Amino acid sequence: MPEEPVIGDSEPQLLEVEAGVHFWCACGHSGHLPFCDGSHKGTGIQPVRFVTAVPVTVAWCPCKHGEVPSVCEETKGP
Ligand code: FES
């Protein structure tokens, strides 16, 4: 059974990422939030893969409860 994720903040973290593959931290233990640094080992939680073909600004979710877990629900467009 996976541990509950650690919720670090209630506000999304707006950050631009380069084109490519990124791994969002789903456990909340990373020292480099919102991205995975491998600290999830032993929690039963895995990082979430995020892929973009172009540089994009993302509202990274801090609460870990979104439908698309890496992106904040409140800042998504229609
Ligand atoms: Fe949190 Fe990897 S450090 S998912």
Image (cartoon, rainbow, N blue to C red):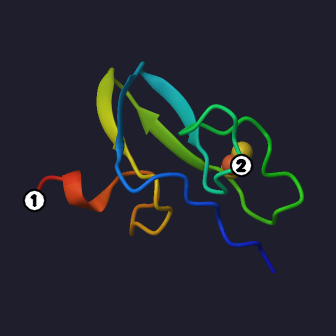
Q: Nearer the viewer, residue 17 or 59?
A: 59
The residue under the point 32% across, 22% down is: 54
The residue indicated by pointer 1 is 78
Q: Cβ–Cβ below 8 Å for labels 2 and 1?
A: no
Does any atom of ligand 1 lie closer than 8 Å to the CB of label 2? Answer: yes
Which one is in front, 8 or 48? Answer: 8
Q: Residues within 10 Å of mark 2 (few under 14, many from 20)?
A: many
Q: Which image quarter is the N terminus in?
A: bottom right
C-alpha separation, residue under disc 2 versus residue under disc 1? 31 Å
Give the foreground label among 2 and 1. 2
- In this view, 38 is above or below 41: above
> Nearest the camera: 19 or 11?
11
Residue 19 vertical position relative to residue 22 in the rendered view, above or below: above
Q: Position of residue 14 (x, y in %)?
A: 33, 34
* Left or right for 17, reference 77: right
Instruction: Identify the residue under disc 2.
Output: 29
